[in-house]
Image (cartoon, rainbow, N blue to C red):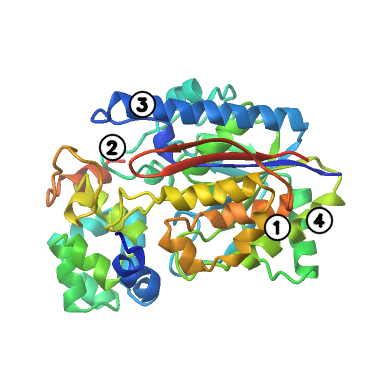
Amino acid sequence: MAFVGAAAAPHSHLQLFTRPAESEQYRKDVQKGREAMLVLREQVEKSGADTILVIHDDHFVNFDFRCYPPFALFVGKEASGSGVTSPQEIERITGATYRTYAGKEDYASAPSGIPQHMANWEQQKPYVYDVNTKLSVHMLQELMRLGFDMPFTANGTMDGEQVLTTNFLNPKADKSIVLLFTNGYVPPLPWPKRCYALGQAIRQILDKADEKVFVLATGGMSHYPGTPLYGYVDQAFDKEVLSFLAEGKGSRFCDYTPDDMMEHGNGELVNWIIAAGIAGDKPATVVDYVPLWHIGLGYVYWEV
Amino acid sequence: MVEPLKILKPFVTDMRHLTSALNIIASDMIRDRSLAKKLDEDPEYFLKTYSIDEAELKAMKDRDLVALFNLGLHPFLLVRFAGMMGILEYWQQIGAPGRTGWPSNSAGNTEGILNASKI
């Protein structure tokens, strides 16, 4: 058995810092979310994983409108990315203790007001992760055999959000990673039922693999960045999702359409749906749900 | 009662981002910050280089985020465009609920372009 557990966790960069105008209650809520992240980290350690499959929606870093695939498997040897604030601050909050970016100390965070995804990402990449290429190439071949015409890419730039979540769950970088990029915010999104089926296919592959693989789905929950709804959070929908996941009914995701997902500010759940397909209809543990004014932060894990 | 699909129609239902070259321009600006300065210094460049029309160029030149959203600039790229233009709290300009009591932004301030070029 090579699938050893899964988690779904937000990748919002605002888990790493709070702006001066935020209230004390907001700071406490953010801290609550960070503590939930540490619970998920315990699950990773407990699972005995040697590899983490990170499922993450690209934020216009590796792809843009010249080509935006619904899914893409990274096949390079090394993935790298910048954080969203200084490495010292990232390491203070996430507990990340490694410095795989030795010799790449040149670092500049984004100036105030510039979206943090942009932070230095086209220059030096302070965080560098080893990729389990044996598994990624095998997954690619097998997914094709199983009927998924999976795009692949050698672009392995990890945006600040992906770095953030990976740092929290893999703080010593002692587990190799595999990256599966998705499209979670550029309609038309992949259909939930297709995402779930992809997860089921990945599970078939992992069950026969030598590695012990923990699955990390990033993103969500409800938020509407860049739209006239920014600041609105559909907590009712978020809670509905968390409720059926806790009941072991992740396949209920298949009832949604892409428009349902976007309507509720939850395009990024495509990542969660793939993870749910991998885990199967097994009750998940909801660690916490922390609604902030601009996003609902959901923290979930599945044990094997 | 919030009706998200009505509000998000240009984006989610009409998917205007699929056909608007505004998104190619914004993507290029992220990679080449000097392009952002051309908006003021050489706006004709965009008409010559990209498949955009006068209305799209005007919306960019005016930093009119409402018009850009309606014309099909993808929301994620809208945030980045706003950042490059020095509009710190973009949601105030597009009338989003945002955060009550948040300090007002510096909409229209082009200082951000200069800052961005120093990254």
Q: Tell which subunit mark 3 falls on.
A: A
Among the 4 quarters of the image, the one containing residue A175:
top right
Percent coordinates x, y for residue A201 in the rendering: 76, 61
Q: Nearer the viewer, mark 3 or mark 2?
A: 3
Q: Residues within 10 Å of mark 3 (few under 14, many from 20)?
A: some
Mark 1 on the same chain as mark 3: yes
> What residue is disc 3 on?
A27
- For the residues labelled 3 and 2, the Cα–Cα distance comes to 21 Å
Q: Which one is earlier in the sequence, the residue at label 4 or at label 3?
A: 3
Question: Which numbered disc covers residue A205?
Answer: 4
Query: Please, which chain is the residue tagged with disc 1 on?
Result: A
Q: Is tag 2's residue or tag 4's residue first in the polypeptide sequence? A: 2
Q: CA distance from mark 4 to mark 3?
A: 41 Å
Amino acid on which disc 1 is placed: Gly
**Residue hosting label 2:** A111
Mark closer to the chain start, 1 or 3: 3
| Camera-side residue of A13 and A117 | A13
Q: Is residue B67 above or below residue A275?
A: below
Per the image, the residue denoted by label 1 is A199
Residue A179: % across, % down: 63, 50
The answer for how far apart the CA atoms under marks 1 and 3 are is: 35 Å
Secondary structure type for disc 4: helix
